[in-house]
Image: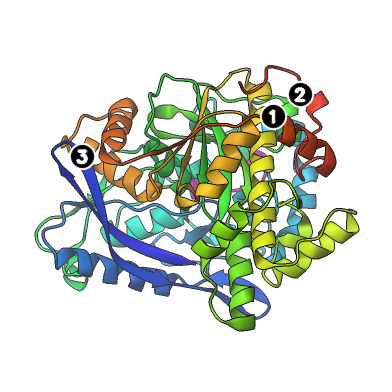
Amino acid sequence: MSGRAVSGLIEDGKVKVSEKGRFHHRQLLLRGHLYWDLMALWRGMLDGLRAAASCGPVESIGIDSWGVDYALVDEPGELVGLPAHYQDGRAAAAMHKLGQLIDPESLYGRNGTALDLRHTLVQLLAEPQGKLERANRMLMLPDLFSFWLTGVEGAEVTIASTTGLLSPATKGWDYELSRRLAVPTKLLAPLRRPGDLGGQVEPMVAEEAGLEGTVGVRVVAAHDTASAAVAVPCDTNAPFAFISIGTWSLVGIELEYPVLTEAARVGGFTNEIGVDGKIQFLHKVTGLRLLAECLRTWGREGGPPNLEALLLAANGLPAGSWLVDPDHPSLSSLGDIPARIRALCRRGGRPVPVQPAEVVRCLVDSLALAHRRVLRDAVALCGRDVNAIHIVGGGSRNHLLCQATADACDLPVIAGPAEASAIGNVLVQAGAAGVIPAGLEQLRACAKRSFELRHYRPAGTALWDSLEDRLGPVAGTPERSDLGGPRAS
């Protein structure tokens, strides 16, 4: 994984971003458990700030990251142990413990969250005896780094909504749920909203980072998915869906109110908080991580492959010739993904992709089909039709995937911007500073006029209807007959 320092500038009513630093980091394996290397993350962030400051004054700083992972700090603000990595295997027993404390239906009705072993709430229940009591606060990772910059504790609401302890209905902490699950309520820091001032960078830290003058840390949408949603270049009032494609594909519809039904729980959908109190009704699908793993495997076998050439060759192959379920458990870990794909196809009695271009075509079509089925389920569950799909994030650069998604969903796709999370982060800071009008609609209007977008028209769904019948249900989603409701059209 990698972190980035990105600078943003508003000029002539448009937002411009440029990367100032990138730092790679890995999980640490210690005594059989996986942890985050916080010091590597902190050092990389300071180096990035120093690089940005060398190019001119820094007006404010905003931090966003992935969700669910957290650190525990005591009363003086010191770490209580190392923060566990979400892929650490400690949480299996905690899932059973959670089920004894509250039934899944009641829990989903309160937090609207699709729980799995990686989830914050499950991780908290897996903490060693006494560790939660020794802690004073649970800080999600962006909140922790904001605290280290400013000395001010707080919990940004969009990333707090990934914990399972926040109510999507009230958009506040569910203290009653916390007490019921024996999670000390003292751990829940005061909530902050995107646009709030999180504090000023402390002088010693500013000196270390090469920052001059008084620099504020602005609260942004600290969950990277929520930041990416800010940069969706759409009319906020239009009925659209969005897919943020990177390591994962986050397929969602933006709503005013959460969907807390049993069908939504069974379907694996999550209600997360967005900017301006919007609800991001989402389902996670394995994304371009699979393609990245394939490239690593082929690179080890014969040198780094040319992705553009592979995509071009895959584009010349017939759509739907090879299919897998991208969320199949055998594809969830690192390793030889091409071999696992071939094994899945043989096991299912389907054609087997052999050449790299065939594997790429298989992955693209399989992801597009997963997008189609999740979007159809989302529309059925929330009762809201959509007339277009916005694809943001790194996957918006993948022309083959964008066209396949348009074809599979029978909806026009608008692709871009690729750096959506960084852009959304910068837009919230600019709106809060009064450089551009604040409010989600105005921020999106700025994104729309700032970037060249690509449009993909659907070519019909007859092929994709037949492919869906061949593959069977995507892992983690219910049968369509369980959902009812309108189609995405």
Identify which residue, 92 or 310, lies in the foreground: 310
Which residue has dot 1 on it? 377
Please report the residue visible at 71 percent of the width from the left and 59 percent of the height from the top: 91
Dot 3 lies on which element? strand
**Tag 1 and tag 2, C-beta contact below 8 Å:** yes
Residue 346 position within the rendered picture, expressed as x and y whole percent measured from the top left: 87, 60
Residues packed near mark 2 inside 10 Å, few (<14), some (14 to 19) or many (20 plus): some
Dot 2 lies on which element? loop
Question: Which residue type carries mark 2?
Answer: Leu
Classify the position of the C terminus by image quarter: top right
Residue range in magenta is 178-188
Q: Is residue 162 visible?
A: no
Q: Residue furthest left?
A: 213
Q: Residue furthest front?
A: 316
Please report the residue visible at 40 percent of the width from the left and 49 percent of the height from the top: 418
Question: Which residue type carries mark 3?
Answer: Lys
Question: Which residue type carries mark 1?
Answer: Asp
Which residue has dot 2 on it? 483
Which residue has dot 3 on it? 14
In this rendering, which labeled residue sits more in front, label 2 or label 3?
3
When the figure is inspected, residue 306 is found, relative to residue 112, above or below; the finding is below
Q: In the rendered view, does 463 fall on the left or right side of 130?
A: right
- Magenta-span inclusion, residue 171: no
Q: Is residue 71 visible?
A: yes
**Tag 1 and tag 3, C-beta contact below 8 Å:** no
Mark 1 → mark 2, Cα distance in angstroms: 7 Å
Please report the residue visible at 34 percent of the width from the left and 57 percent of the height from the top: 147
Mark 2 → mark 3, Cα distance in angstroms: 42 Å
Residues packed near mark 3 inside 10 Å, few (<14), some (14 to 19) or many (20 plus): some
